[in-house]
Amino acid sequence: MDVRASITVEMARETVSLLERRRIEAKIVKPIYEVLKRELGEDAAKRIIRDAVRASAIEAGRGLAERHGPNRNLETFAHLIPLWSEGGALEIDTIRRDENALDFDVCRCRYAEMYREIGAEELGPLLSCNRDGSLAEGYDPEIELTRTHTIMEGAERCDFRFRLRRERS
């Protein structure tokens, strides 16, 4: 990629919201997913998409970690929430936020609404929810996510519980 193309891609990242990026991705991935499903079966199609998105999210987490430097922790990770919530994409109730825990519930998810709107609700968990724990893992392998339910899969709320594998004192 030449310098001008690289700059154009970087500028696009800065001007398109994360919600809109997910819409664009879903519109691109949906026909690919349908072909994979037809050719390989639903389980294999989901596994392929899930694995590709997971690898991408880990790499994105590593990139964010590089920007935050060696002093990254759950508190610096929490600074990413406004990026996910940009433009009202998520409505969040924060439960706990400190150096060892980041707990919040999502009470409205416009990502889920968008996937339903474009007829890609089956892809929502793969393209969006699937990223959360993987992004954290790439950011800091000591951060893990526990989540028991999501709006994307029909729950009333999403419960995000990020913890350090070993608490820091």
Image: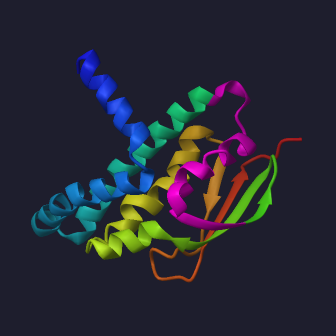
User: Is residue 80 rendered to the left or right of residue 9?
Assistant: right
Q: Position of residue 6 (x, y in %)?
A: 30, 24
Please, which colouring scheme is shown? Answer: rainbow
Report the front residue among 125 and 167. Answer: 125
Report the front residue among 3 and 51. Answer: 3
Q: For the point 69% across and 25% down, which residue is it?
A: 70
User: Is residue 87 rendered to the left or right of residue 2?
Assistant: right
Q: For the point 33% across and 76% down, which residue is it?
A: 116
- Quadrant of the rendering where the N terminus is positioned: top left
Q: Position of residue 168 (x, y in %)?
A: 83, 42
Q: Is residue 6 above or below residue 130?
A: above
- Quadrant of the rendering where the C terminus is positioned: top right
Q: Position of residue 43 (x, y in %)?
A: 27, 68
Q: Position of residue 77 (x, y in %)?
A: 66, 44
Q: Say how many tags the image has.
A: 0
Question: Which span is picked out in magenta?
Answer: 68-93
Q: For the point 45% across and 37% down, which residue is it?
A: 59
Q: Main secondary structure of the magenta part?
A: helix
- Residue 49 image-quadrant placement: bottom left
Q: Is residue 38 above or below residue 168?
A: below
